[in-house]
């Protein structure tokens, strides 16, 4: 049995996060031992771990890969913890042409093979900021994308990315885009605050969270 203190290393305060993560990965590979790493840093958790456990108020809410935790949160609390930001209340509707979720920013189509939802049921639609793509107004879309149109309210420097706030009706969405990711977006004709923008997200990036009905919340 050996613990981490037996290994010569620099003080952790002298290591940048990337170096610390690489040191831990090398140590785990060398010793072939399980490592339990406790952190409040979401990027660290997603980068270092093969499995991430989310604890909220002392209870285990979700366990899975870092990608699953970020893109398929188990509930609203996990979505908020992972900074999903865009959480849209909606109601499932069904027609002869298929099912969709009616939200304040438009009707989000559902795949027939997607998550099990009941017509008339209440859901939260989660679309992470980095899942949005900026498109030109004349762009054409297939049935695998949800599209909405809004007005660019604000552009903020967000490290290696830009954080955009876009008003779609009375709803404000947050969009996170790397510099230069969209030739028709930031840095182009749509980079002016007040300009109309078209947002789209693939249906794979749309996640639904069932919302408990009032009688369910009070049950038990």
Image (tube, helix red, strand yellow):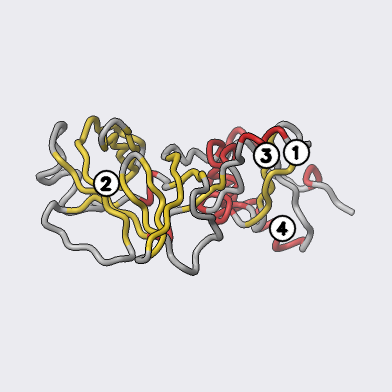
Q: Residues within 10 Å of mark 1 (few under 14, many from 20)?
A: few
Residue 158 in which image quadrant: top left
Distance in Å between CA atoms under marks 1 and 3: 20 Å
Q: Residues within 10 Å of mark 4 (few under 14, many from 20)?
A: few
- The image shows residue 179 at horizontal and vertical percentages of 27, 46
2 and 1 marks in contact (CB < 8 Å): no
Which quadrant: the C terminus? top right
Q: Which residue is mark 1?
A: 59
Q: Which residue is mark 3?
A: 216
Which quadrant: the N terminus? bottom right
In this view, the residue in front, 160 or 141, is 141
Which numbered disc, 2 or 1, marks the residue that appears first in the sequence?
1
Q: Which residue is mark 4?
A: 28
Which numbered disc, 4 or 2, marks the residue that appears first in the sequence?
4
130 relative to 3 in the view: left or right:
left
Distance in Å between CA atoms under marks 3 and 4: 44 Å
């Amino acid at each position: 049995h050996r613990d981490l203190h037996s290994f010569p290393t620099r003080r952790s305060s002298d290591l940048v996060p990337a170096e610390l993560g690489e040191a831990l990965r090398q140590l785990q590979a060398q010793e072939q031992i399980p490592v339990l790493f406790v952190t409040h840093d979401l990027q660290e958790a997603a980068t270092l771990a093969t499995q991430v456990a989310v604890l909220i108020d002392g209870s285990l809410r979700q366990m899975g890969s870092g990608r699953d935790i970020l893109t398929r949160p188990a509930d609203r609390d996990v979505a908020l913890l992972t900074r999903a930001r865009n959480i849209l209340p909606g109601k499932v509707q069904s027609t002869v042409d298929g099912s969709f979720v009616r939200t304040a920013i438009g009707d989000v189509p559902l795949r027939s093979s997607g998550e099990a939802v009941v017509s008339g049921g209440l859901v939260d639609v989660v679309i992470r900021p980095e899942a949005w793509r900026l498109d030109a107004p004349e762009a054409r879309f297939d049935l695998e994308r949800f599209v909405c149109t809004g007005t660019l309210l604000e552009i903020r420097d967000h490290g290696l990315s830009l954080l955009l706030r876009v008003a779609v009706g009375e709803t404000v969405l947050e969009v996170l885009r790397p510099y230069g990711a969209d030739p028709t977006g930031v840095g182009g004709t749509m980079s002016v605050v007040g300009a109309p923008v078209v947002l789209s997200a693939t249906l794979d990036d749309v996640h639904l969270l069932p919302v408990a009905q009032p009688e369910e919340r009070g049950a038990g």
